[in-house]
């Protein structure tokens, strides 16, 4: 189903089957076994929502050494190529909004205050994202990972009319599901990359709970010397000076 066939956003969401169909697609996100499968769901959700463009971005904010941006693109790929060629991440007003706000909004309500921010917006419009719904998705706790879903229409003012109240609820649900899925996927990849075992993860959890060497040894059924040795290895793997910093870093980046 396509928004162009139904007219206004009000017409689109006024279909009594609309919300149910979209929710069915949102529920499929958690069942995706890989990024390509998650992208397939995003394409299907975009079609049911009646929009032409959909982009999901998962990124780490904060220290430059840990920043990363992952794109799930159900939109014109030329937009992403140009965006990445200019490395416009830090100048993107939509990402800035998603990093500090939680309420879905129309991109037209996000003010571009610099020339680069206006260029970012102009690039999106060039490739069909003229009227855009921005749905942020944050992570609870200390994790710096943020998600942002951008749903776009080539028709100016499409999201500014009636019907946006229901649409943004569905957009928020899709954004949160995609963010949760991607955060879990990244966690699994990081655990594999670092070679962390289940016992390593238990040890990190125990440190966060304030357990000392003797208590951790008792809970893991090993010796204090073995615990100290494991901490030396974990500190090296995560590049941290001591166990407290290692556990905090692991929690911050979603490992535990």
Image (spheres, rainbow, N blue to C red):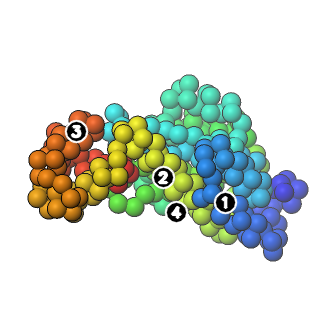
Residue drawn at (29%, 49%), measured in percent from left and top? 200
Residue 204 placement, left or right of 151: left
Whether label 2 touches label 4, CB < 8 Å: no
Residue 143 placed where, x, y %? 36, 53
Nearest to viewer (mark 3 / mark 4):
3
Residue 21 placed where, x, y %? 76, 66
SS under mark 4: loop
Work out whether residue 130 can be spotted. no
Q: For mark 3, what is the residue? A: 233
Measure the C-alpha gap from mark 1 to mark 3. Answer: 39 Å
Q: For mark 1, what is the residue? A: 28
| Dot 2 or dot 1, earlier in sequence | 1
Measure the C-alpha gap from mark 2 to mark 4. Answer: 23 Å
Nearest to viewer (mark 2 / mark 3):
3
Q: Label 3 neighbourhood size at 10 Å, few (<14), some (14-19), many (20+)?
A: few
In-front residue for pair 4/26: 26
Say the numbered circle drawn on residue 184: 2
Q: Label 2 neighbourhood size at 10 Å, few (<14), some (14-19), many (20+)?
A: some
In-front residue for pair 235/178: 235
Residue drawn at (86%, 60%), measured in percent from left and top? 6
Measure the C-alpha gap from mark 1 to mark 4. Answer: 23 Å
Say the numbered circle drawn on residue 103: 4
SS under mark 3: helix
Whether label 2 touches label 1, CB < 8 Å: no
Measure the C-alpha gap from mark 2 to mark 3. Answer: 24 Å
| Dot 1 or dot 4, earlier in sequence | 1
Residue 33 placed where, x, y %? 61, 50
Find residue 177 and report its image quarter.
bottom right
| Dot 3 or dot 4, earlier in sequence | 4
């Amino acid at each position: 189903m396509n928004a162009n066939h139904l007219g206004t956003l009000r017409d689109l969401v006024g279909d009594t089957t609309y919300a149910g169909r979209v929710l069915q697609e949102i529920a499929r996100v958690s069942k995706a076994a890989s990024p390509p499968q998650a992208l397939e769901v995003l394409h299907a959700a975009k079609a049911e929502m009646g929009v032409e463009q959909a982009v999901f971005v998962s990124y780490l904010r904060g220290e430059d050494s840990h920043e990363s941006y992952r794109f799930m693109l159900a939109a014109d790929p030329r937009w992403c190529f140009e965006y990445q060629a200019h490395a416009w991440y830090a100048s993107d007003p939509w990402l800035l909004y998603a990093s500090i706000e939680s309420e879905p909004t129309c991109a037209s309500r996000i003010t571009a205050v610099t020339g680069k921010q206006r260029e970012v917006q102009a690039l999106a419009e060039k490739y069909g994202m003229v009227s855009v719904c921005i749905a942020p998705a944050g992570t609870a706790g200390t994790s710096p990972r943020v998600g942002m879903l951008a749903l776009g229409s080539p028709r100016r003012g499409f999201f500014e009319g009636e019907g946006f109240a229901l649409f943004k609820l569905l957009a928020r649900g899709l954004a949160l599901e995609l963010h949760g899925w991607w955060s879990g996927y990244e966690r699994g990849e990081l655990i594999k990359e670092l070679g962390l075992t289940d016992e390593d993860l238990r040890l990190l959890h125990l440190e966060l709970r304030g357990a000392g060497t003797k208590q951790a040894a008792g809970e893991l059924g090993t010796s204090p010397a073995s615990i100290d040795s494991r901490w030396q290895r974990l500190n090296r793997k995560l590049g941290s000076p001591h166990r407290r910093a290692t556990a905090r870093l692991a929690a911050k980046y979603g490992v535990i």
